[in-house]
Each structure stands twice: as C-alpha cells, then as structure tokens.
Image: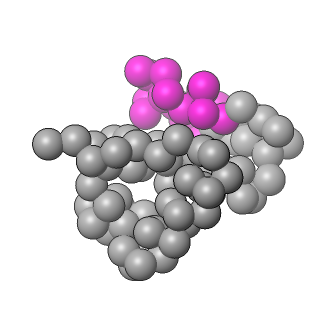
Amino acid sequence: MTTVHVAASEPDAQFLAPNQIVPMLIGATVDEVERELVLQTLARCDGNRTRASRVLGLSVRTLRNKIRLYAASGIEVPAYQD
C-alpha cells in the first residue's frame, strides 16, 4: 500500500505540479487513491460533508456511504469542526 496520505498532508502539497503528484500515486490502487482524496477533502472542508461532497462531485449520500465503509474498516475520518 502506497502512503499517499503523508505526501498529501504536507503544507506545500497543494502547490505540487501534476508531474510531481503522479509518481506518488504509482503503486496505489484506485480505491486507495479515492479514499485519500475523500479523506483529504473532508479534512480541508473541516469535516463538512455537504461542502466536501460538492468539491468531490458526489452526492452527500454517496460520500456518507464511503465514510461509513472507511469507519467500519477502522480508518479515522475527519470530524466536523465548528
């Protein structure tokens, strides 16, 4: 399993060019990449599922179902921050 989470959580990660991001993703499964994208988006949206679903282009229901699967697998999901 590729550790995309560590690279994506770096402060300058939002400024990486696509040719810098792709090598970090090689070796990761589509499910792993999707999970990291969902978790990172939730974190940047302060756990706001409605806003994260809009950013991701998913319905809130689909996002909620993905979160439920991640939590059932023991993966920590960012909580809503006031």
**Is residue 12 in sight in this rendering?**
yes
State the residue at coordinates (36%, 66%). Answer: 53
Residue 81 vertical position relative to residue 73 in the rendered view, above or below? above
| Image spot of residue 60 (x, y percent) | 36, 74
Q: Quadrant of residue 4?
A: top right
| Image spot of residue 2 (x, y percent) | 78, 35
Quick check: is 15 in the magenta stretch?
yes
Q: Residue 52 or 61: which is nearer the viewer?
A: 61
State the residue at coordinates (60%, 63%). Answer: 69
Which quadrant holds the C terminus? top left
Q: Is residue 37 left or right of residue 45?
A: right
State the residue at coordinates (39%, 49%). Answer: 42
Which span is picked out in magenta?
A: 4-20
Q: Quadrant of residue 28?
A: top right
Which color scheme is applied?
A: one colour
Given the current orientation, which residue lies at the most extreme left position?
A: 82
Residue 46 vertical position relative to residue 20 in the rendered view, above or below? below
Which quadrant holds the N terminus? top right
Q: Residue 32 or 73: which is nearer the viewer?
A: 73
Q: Residue 71 or 13: which is nearer the viewer?
A: 71
Given the current orientation, which residue lies at the most extreme top position?
A: 11
Quick check: is 61 in the magenta stretch?
no
Examine the residues drawn in magenta and state their main secondary structure.
helix
Residue 65 vertical position relative to residue 74 in the rendered view, above or below? below
**Is residue 45 in sight in this rendering?**
no
User: What is the total number of numbered labels drawn onto the structure image?
Assistant: 0
Residue 75 vertical position relative to residue 62 in the rendered view, above or below? above
| Image spot of residue 47 (x, y percent) | 31, 48
| Image spot of residue 32 (x, y percent) | 71, 51
